[in-house]
Amino acid sequence: GAVVSQHPSRVICKSGTSVKIECRSLDFQATTMFWYRQFPKQSLMLMATSNEGSKATYEQGVEKDKFLINHASLTLSTLTVTSAHPEDSSFYICSASGRAGTEAFFGQGTRLTVV
Amino acid sequence: SQKIEQNSEALNIQEGKTATLTCNYTNYSPAYLQWYRQDPGRGPVFLLLIRENEKEKRKERLKVTFDTTLKQSLFHITASQPADSATYLCALDGGNQGGKLIFGQGTELSVKP
C-alpha cells in the first residue's frame, strides 16, 4: 500500500515555543491530507483538512491561528503548533487517501510533549 | 451530532477463540464503514472497508458485517492469536471526501496464549 511518512516521531518543547510536524506521501500525490489529534485512551479527533494550494479547513473548536497548516506541494503537508502549552501535549497523526470510499494511509504519528 | 460507540471495555480472550468487536453509530448515514488496527504509539493501519449496500466482507481471518438498519457493524477475528492484540478502531466514511473519517474510541483486544 501507499506510504505516508511523518516526522518527527517524538518532540519535547518548552511552553511558548512553536513546533513543526511534517507529513509526506512518499509514493503518491495527495491533494488532500488530514490532521488528527489523539489523547490517551481516546479516539482520533479530526482537526483539519489540508488542501494542496489552498487554505486548510478546520473542524469546529480547532484554533486555526494556533495550528497552522501548510500544504505547499502534492506530497507534503505541515502542521505547526504555535505558542505551545502543556495542554497541547498529545499524539498528532496525519493521513492521506485516494478517492472517497478507499482506505486511508496514516503516518506513524508524532508524540508532542510541552514542558 | 454524530456519535460512534465501540466496546468501551478491553476485550480479553483466549488464543484460538473468535473475538467480536462492536461499533454502533447514531445521527449519521455513512456510505462506507472502515476498520483499522492501532498499536501503541503508532498510526492506524487499514484492515477492511465495507459499503452501505454490503452485508458482509471477509479477508483471511477477518470478517465485518454492516447493518444500516441497526446502525451497527461487527468485526470478527477468528482463530485469534496473541499477535492480534491491539486497539481496533471503526471509522465512518461519508463518501463525500476521500480520507475524511470519523473514528470511534477503539476497543483494546488482548489475546492470551
Image (cartoon, rainbow, N blue to C red):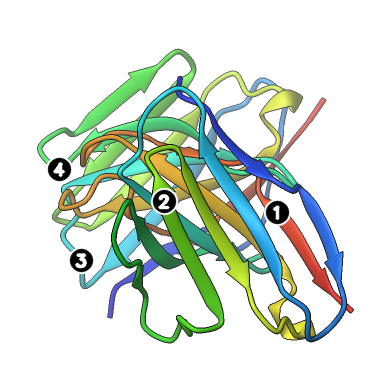
Q: Which mark is residue B28?
A: 3
**SS at mark 2?**
strand
Mark 2 or mark 3, which is nearer to you? Answer: 2
User: Amino acid type of disc 2?
Assistant: Ala
**SS at mark 4?**
loop
- To the question of a shared chain for discs 2 and 1, the answer is yes
- A69 relative position to A19: left or right: left
Q: Are marks 4 and 2 in contact (CB under 8 Å)?
A: no
- Local crowd at mark 4 within 10 Å, few (<14), some, or many (≥20)? some
Instruction: Give the x, y percent position of residue A73.
Output: 40, 43
Point 21% across, 41% down: residue: A100
Q: Which mark is residue B51?
A: none
- Local crowd at mark 1 within 10 Å, few (<14), some, or many (≥20)? many
Mark 3 or mark 1, which is nearer to you? Answer: 1
Mark 1 or mark 4, which is nearer to you? Answer: 1
Instruction: Give the x, y percent position of residue B20.
Output: 50, 40
Q: Quadrant of residue B1?
A: bottom left
**Chain for disc number 2:** A
User: Which residue bears the numbered disc 1?
Assistant: A110
